[in-house]
Image (cartoon, rainbow, N blue to C red):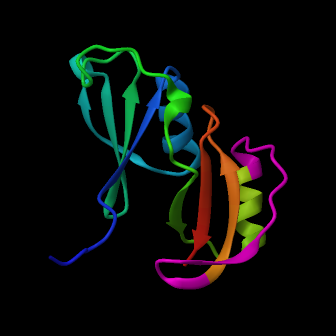
Amino acid sequence: MELLGLDHVVIRTAKVEQLLAFYQEVLGAMLERVLEDEGLYQLRAGAALIDILSTEGSLDSGAAVDVRSSPIAHICMQVKAPSEQALIRTLKRKGVMETLIFATRYGATGFGRSLYIHDPDGNTLELKLV
């Protein structure tokens, strides 16, 4: 077996419309596939997918899911920007009102500069410049 990389991340939420807007309008993901009966919305993020799964969907046999029961600490996404300040300006212009502080962190591509933000459902996202 050879591990090739991240395929997709599934985020359960009761705030589907807010998360779709955030991931598309703020981060630039593209809606690729919708399975409305299952409450599943798949967004293209480079080579991977971000799946937004409604807590009211039928993908989990119709059972309601406590969004906060997820063990995911954060999701790291590689992003391209001319500079750290350019990324901060873009995020602020798109409505991200958090304090944005870069730090050097280790990840799949080695050490690099990244910052943390939160989506409308409170999930922590690390944006790593590549």
Instruction: Please tell me whether residue 97 belongs to the stretch shown in magenta.
Output: yes
Q: Name the residue: 81% across, 64% down.
A: 101
Which x, y percent locates residue 64? 39, 15
Instruction: Please tell me whether residue 107 belongs to the stretch shown in magenta.
Output: yes
Residue at the extreme left: 1
In the displayed structure image, the side of residue 92 where residue 65 appears, left or right: left
Which x, y percent locates residue 125? 60, 53
Observer-nearest of 27 and 102: 102
Q: How many marks?
A: 0
In this rendering, the answer to whether 39 lies above or below 4 is above
Q: Quadrant of the N terminus?
A: bottom left
In this rendering, the answer to whether 56 lies above or below 124 is above
Observer-nearest of 76 and 60: 60
Observer-nearest of 48 and 80: 48
Residue at the extreme right: 99
For residue 103, what is the image quadrant?
bottom right
In the displayed structure image, the side of residue 3 where residue 100 appears, left or right: right
Specify the segment rendered in magenta: 92-111
Which x, y percent locates residue 20? 47, 33
Observer-nearest of 57 and 85: 57
In this rendering, the answer to whether 81 lies above or below 66 is below
Q: Quadrant of the C terminus?
A: bottom right
Q: Name the residue: 49% across, 24% down.
A: 17
In the displayed structure image, the side of residue 58 where residue 83 appears, left or right: right
Q: Name the residue: 55% across, 51% down.
A: 27
Which x, y percent locates residue 82? 65, 76
In this rendering, the answer to whether 86 lies above or below 34 is below
Q: Name the residue: 31% across, 70% down.
A: 5
